[in-house]
Image (cartoon, helix red, strand yellow):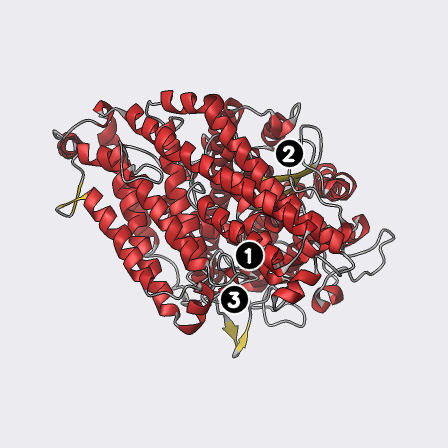
Amino acid sequence: MKISKLLVLALTVIFMISCDSNEGTEIDVPSSYEFTRNGETTVSFTGQTTRIQMATELVGAITDFDNSTEELLLQMYRNQDANGGDVDPYSSADLNAATKNVKSKVAASTDYFSSNTTISAEIKDQFETWLINQVQDVYPNENTAAAQGKPGQIADGSSTRYVNGKGFEYNQLVAKSLIGSLMADQILNNYLSVSVLDAGTNREDNTSTTLAEDSNYTNMEHKWDEAYGYLYGNADDLANPLPTVGDADRFLNNYLGSVEEDEDFSGISQETFDAFKLGRAAIVAGEYDVRDEQAQIIRENLSTVIAVRAVYYLQSGKNALDQSTPDYGAAFHDLSEAYGFIFSLQFTRVPNSGSPYLTKTDVDGFLSQLEDGNGLWDVTPETLDNITNDIAAQFDFTIEEAAN
Amino acid sequence: MKRIALILLTALVISGCTENGPSGPNVDDFDREAILNNWADNIIIPSFSNLAESSSTLQTDAEFFVENPTPQTLQELRNSWKTTYLEFQKVSMFQIGKAMEVRYRDNMNIYPTDTTEIKENVQTGDYNLTLPSLNNSQGFPALDFLLNGLGDNDTEILTYYTTNTNADGYRAYLTDLTSRIDSLTNEVLADWTSGYRDEFVSNSGNGANSSLDMMVNDYIFYYEKHLRAGKIGIPAGVFSGSTLKGHVEAYYSDPFSKELFITALNATQDFFNGKHFDSSDSGESLHSYLNYLKTMREGMDLTVAINNQFNAARDEAEVLDASLARQVESDNSKMLATYDKLQINVVYLKVDMLQALNINVDYTDADGD
């Protein structure tokens, strides 16, 4: 009985989908992410590329014990000094010349944070606390062995990891938390949002092809491209980023690539790219419903990437701990990554809703379970399983699919 | 509509049944404890005992050398380094129990060694060899550099232990390294002989935490990462695209890398066959277990296929230069041919054998970040 109902439902859905494409004007979808007007490109997302590169340098500098200081790390995060003055903290001259910065775009989406500035500031400052703690607590202990309550180094296979007194690696916390708070938040809750795409006179301007000042694009086109840029902005071939998905950066692109490699999720990369492409083409054609449908696909897929990696690292961390000789080093590394992906879950977006898959309250609850007491030194496999279950329950994948 | 659902269900049920056909002998009917016994008493403990004797001689010779640094004592020390390094190849795969806890292999044999860090350590005299970040500046590869790589010839090398402004530092560092090799080896051996042996043998069930599952995983991990990749694949550029001759084992020594590889290859094959240490006898093993289960691969006994493949890899390696670094430079295709032969056995061991023994792989490729 139940099955026949499902079948009806499935058929109805298929019917509805097939009806969809028969209406409206034709949308001209290019094979790559290339859009032009009067022979010139209309695509621009240099600011996103810049921020990905700034974040990359920042994350690398966190474990550069010989050269980094608290001041330098904070400057790399803010791209200004404590008095707001211009600074040149990066190794790349282009980045030093840029006026963009990472910090101002952390937890800064219109949908989630425009009227939630207290939380926004709290999250922005969280990163500074991690950077400061790294220099104050971990740096002095570079050459001591880590132990409960004692920062220092610990072996993970043939790698050496540097952890705080609770076993967390600050570089992993920063890197993996930026995936949600910078990349996902800007894409899912800002640039793909109706509130941003249709802000002001954007929709009329786009329909009438009124271009933004001194530009070859409409504001709406540009907003969509900026979303694209946070995912693909550091790819070798910016218009054809699919073949190198996973290699463009160590942030969201990297983990979209990882999830794509898991055969339970293969196709997610193509589907995401296609949605970006179709959505952009729909803007050119003035097909705003199609545009918004693509935004929902991207929201679901990129949210899923974050959740899959959270589950993956929770489970591999659990397996490293749950053996007769626990492999603390391997577990701490996995669970530090898990921490960042869990942190990132609060920036996910359930399609056709205004909410994340897991709220900030949920996330803070999970994180405090990891940090409790001696932190990762005494977290139990049961706790890790419970968090895993709570996360997976909000998504359409099983723990097995994500963990393998 | 209901009928379609019924047909679908029936099809599902039917396809679900086909997996459960009658099968051969049950994996649980074999006496796994007999394998563990043979491994512990006839292979693992004798191999570590033998290594401990060598490492003790190495330590004595190093102490003698630093007191009397001459061309002759240098040569003697090199010889005992070689003997000990070869004996180490026979235990490197046993990263279980205490060896796992102290990360024995990582302390003994990470190469290429970090020569800058070694010199820094000697310079400052301020180093803690128990730190993971110093794993790559100790063990056999660091000794290789200290005994063979400091200068172009023996006279030049000897100056580091005689007239060099840091001669005291070099002498101390050398004996600190040999002493650590000796003490870690004895620590692992003592654990086997004072209780762990019984624990290991009696943990004869199945499941992820049983001795057999853990040892087999350690064995295959070693075969895949350290024998196949470390000794052959990485220098041959299989993973990097271009060759890396500086990544061969014992890079600074007179040609020695091939002998280390062959010794390790033989040890992994002997372990598979349950062959006793330094003897032609053999006992219960993965080989006898698989034969009991009558495991076949493409019409051939899996055990025959695996042994054929070990032999094929050794045959392929016969033609390699005694120095794998030279081989990489002169004709890397022969290195790649050896690698290919080794790779085939990864599949036989990791897929066919594990499936037959109902053992899950407990490690994954690290994602590199």
The residue that disc 3 covers is A238
Query: In the picture provided, is A92 more to the left or to the right than B345?
Result: right
Q: Nearer the viewer, mark 2 or mark 1?
A: 1
The crowding category of the residue bearing disc 2, from other C-alpha atoms within 10 Å (few below 14, some 14 to 19, many at least 20), is many
Residue A173: image location, x then y, percent: 64, 41
Residue type at mark 2 is Gly
For the residues beneath circles 2 and 3, the answer to whether they share a chain is yes
Q: Secondary structure at mark 2?
A: loop
Task: Give the quadrant of residue A5.
Answer: top left
Residue B157 can be seen, yes or no: yes
- Kindly identify which residue carries mark 1: B112
Q: Is residue A40 above or below residue B344?
A: below
Mark 3: give few (<14), some (14-19) or many (20+) Cα within 10 Å. some
A318 or B82: which is nearer to us? B82
Label total for image:
3
- What distance separates the C-alpha of mark 2 from that of mark 3? 38 Å
Image marks 1 and 3: residues in contact by CB distance under 8 Å: no
Neighbour class for label 1 at 10 Å: few (<14), some, many (≥20)?
A: some
Proximity of marks 2 and 1: CB atoms separated by less than 8 Å: no
Q: Nearer the viewer, residue A387 or B173?
A: B173
Q: Residue at position x 32%, y 36% from top?
A: B276
At x 59% / y 47%, what residue is drawn? B61
Q: Which residue is denoted by mark 2 in the rendering? A: A167
Q: Chain of mark 3?
A: A
Q: Is residue B350 above or below residue A248?
A: above
Please state if A159 lies on the left or on the right of A58 as rendered.
Answer: left
Point 51% across, 28% down: residue: B190
Circle 2 chain? A
Mark 1, chain letter?
B
**Label 1: which secondary element:** loop
Q: Amino acid at mark 1?
A: Pro
**Residue A374, position as x, y percentages in the image:** 66, 25
